[in-house]
């Protein structure tokens, strides 16, 4: 493979990127196979080769979101962070508006497609509870997830200074140095 080909995403990845872009541009209900194919620069038949229907495309969006998030957690843990701290840091680094809006689009389209995410959240919750007091671990996760969902929906967003202070306070709690 030439160096130029290595940097180009494969067709499946291009389609997934295009689906996320369609959601950002047109909202969850604006995600169509035709629009996604157009944004990806592939034919609808080419899209259908990789994703036979809209459900399979949306399921792949959810699975990709999970994989990216888990990848950030793993990288943080390789750097010596606890799971709870890695979860917090991954949440501040990876949980993009793209992923969140894709999640909302999936819920609007077919709530059953959330099963992989529900399953993964159970695993994350178990790991959080195994490492910390379950009440504190759950409180931390709820704050993290609540902040993410508030950002996705644009609900009463604090300014950057408050957000930084909140993240520092959460890190203090995670590290057991709450003042």
Image: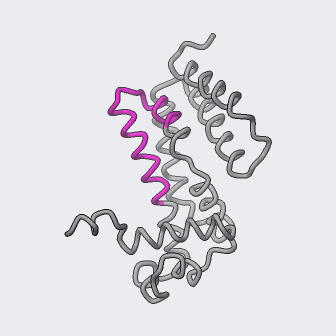
Residue positioned 63% across, 70% down in the render: 110
Residue 84 magenta-highlighted: yes
Q: Position of residue 27 (x, y in %)?
A: 69, 67
Q: Which range of residues does the magenta coloring cover?
A: 63-89
* Residue 5 higher or lower than 120, as above or below: below
Q: Quadrant of residue 157?
A: top right
Residue positioned 47% across, 47% down in the render: 69
165 or 7: nearer the viewer: 7
3 or 82: nearer the viewer: 3
Say which quadrant the N terminus sits in. Answer: bottom left
53 relative position to 109: left or right: left
Residue 39 magenta-highlighted: no
Q: Position of residue 125 (x, y in %)?
A: 52, 39
179 or 164: nearer the viewer: 164
19 relative position to 67: left or right: right
Q: Position of residue 168 (x, y in %)?
A: 59, 23
């Amino acid at each position: 493979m030439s160096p130029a080909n290595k940097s180009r995403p494969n067709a499946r990845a291009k389609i997934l990127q295009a689906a996320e872009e369609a959601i950002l541009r047109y909202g969850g209900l604006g995600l169509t196979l035709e629009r996604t194919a157009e944004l990806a620069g592939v034919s609808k038949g080419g899209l259908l080769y990789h994703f036979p229907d809209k459900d399979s495309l949306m399921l792949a969006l959810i699975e990709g979101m999970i994989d990216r998030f888990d990848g950030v957690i793993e990288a943080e843990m390789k750097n010596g962070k606890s799971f709870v701290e890695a979860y917090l840091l991954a949440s501040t680094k990876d949980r993009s508006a793209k992923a969140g809006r894709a999640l909302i689009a999936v819920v609007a389209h077919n709530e059953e497609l959330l099963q992989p995410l529900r399953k993964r959240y159970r695993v994350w919750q178990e790991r959080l509870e195994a490492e910390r007091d379950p009440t504190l671990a759950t409180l931390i996760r709820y704050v993290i997830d609540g902040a993410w969902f508030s950002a996705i929906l644009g609900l009463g967003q604090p300014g950057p200074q408050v957000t930084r202070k909140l993240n520092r306070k959460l890190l203090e709690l995670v590290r057991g140095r709450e003042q």
